[in-house]
Image (cartoon, helix red, strand yellow):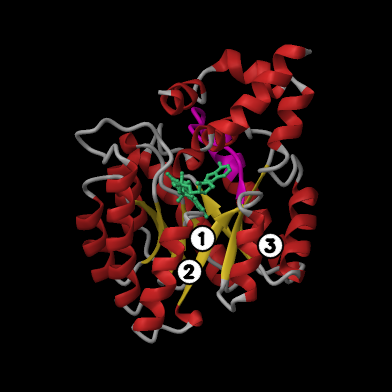
Amino acid sequence: MLRSLLLYLSERESPKKLITGNPLGRRLASRFIAGEEIEDALRVIRRLNSEGFLVTLDCLGESVREAAAAEAACQTYLQLLDRLAAEKLNSHVSVKLTQLGLAMDEGLARRNLARLAESAARHHNFVRVDMEGSAFTDATLRVFCSVDAPREVMGIAIQAYLRRTEADVEELLKRGVRIRLVKGAYQEPPDIAYARKREVDRNYQKLTEKLLASGIYHAIATHDEHLIAATESFARAHSISPEGFEFQLLYGIRRQLQRVLIQQGWRVRLYVPYGREWYAYFMRRLAERPANLFFLMRHLFRQ
Ligand SMILES: Cc1cc2nc3c(=O)[nH]c(=O)nc-3n(C[C@H](O)[C@H](O)[C@H](O)COP(=O)(O)OP(=O)(O)OC[C@H]3O[C@@H](n4cnc5c(N)ncnc54)[C@H](O)[C@@H]3O)c2cc1C
């Protein structure tokens, strides 16, 4: 219930003002967010690269409602790709299609994604399309599949909590697509998504095995130690080398686990978000771990 409430609040304006305007809200968010400016993010990437982590950089923002905002987001990503190349940083970019205009005009989102893919190809870099709530699943897959880019340049995130996902994975594998497998971070009804953690985890493990067996380079994105251990065992049992796939984790979450994975010789990419539009992202992180929320509430109402 608490998870549902937090995900509901993540889309509302008044709690947004309360939390983003409060110094403690900002301080707690800074655990998960690299900063509000591009220079903050580049500094964090430099440090993470020097510690052996790969990165994927997300300029926060979603659900834009004006063409000008979609154009601005696209321009920002183009600049990011230029900056990452100029500074020789080891970082992909991750983008939400509603940030590129999907909620207004599918064609606009497609054209913007094609521009990012073209720039990524020129820089030998990679664009990952994040997956959003189920209202956008079909459109996201449609736009992604309609952009003609080599598989080394563009991939997509897929959510294990959706019942449809196994069929989507089959289709994407036929096309040779590089997939980031996540559990899923949005509020979804039980007729389309598994509600119980046990069911989501079972599907996640099944899909992980399908991805690793495909021979395509995929990303296993979770902080769940059981699923990570199961992935490691499967890889070893099937002689899949650490270069054959990567683990992905979110910046600021399970930092000790992140370091252990690197020490064990696995490839680890951290998802690093930055920017002023951090509220919705932050609320999804609170929803994943309510202990974070109790800490925030205690301090917010004490002030
Ligand atoms: C690299 C990356 C990219 C992602 N991209 C997307 C995407 O495109 N679309 C999408 O819907 N979702 C995305 N997600 C989020 C994902 O769907 C889950 O909501 C999130 O990863 C939590 O699930 P989990 O797999 O870590 O497992 P869980 O079972 O939720 O967590 C396992 C353990 O990890 C720790 N943990 C998890 N979350 C937190 C937290 N917020 N704070 C502190 N500890 C925590 C806890 O110890 C918990 O017991 C992404 C996640 C990652 C790692």
Q: Which residue is mark 2?
A: 153
Say which mark, if any, is on residue 127.
Answer: 1
Q: Residue furthest bottom?
A: 239
**Disc 3 vs disc 2: Cβ atoms closer than 8 Å?**
no
Mark 1 or mark 2, which is nearer the start of the sequence?
1
Circle 3 packing at 10 Å, graded few (<14), some (14-19), many (20+), is: some
Amino acid type, mark 2:
Val
Residue at (76% x, 26% y) in the render: 24
**x, y percentage for residue 56?**
59, 59
Q: Which residue is mark 3?
A: 82
**x, y percentage for residue 248?**
53, 61
Q: Is residue 72 left or right of residue 157?
A: right
- Element type at mark 3: helix
**Disc 2 vs disc 1: Cβ atoms closer than 8 Å?**
yes
Circle 1 packing at 10 Å, graded few (<14), some (14-19), many (20+), is: many
Mark 3 or mark 1, which is nearer the start of the sequence?
3
Question: Which stretch appears magenta?
Answer: 58-73
Q: Which is more toward the observer, 150 or 93?
A: 93
- Element type at mark 2: loop
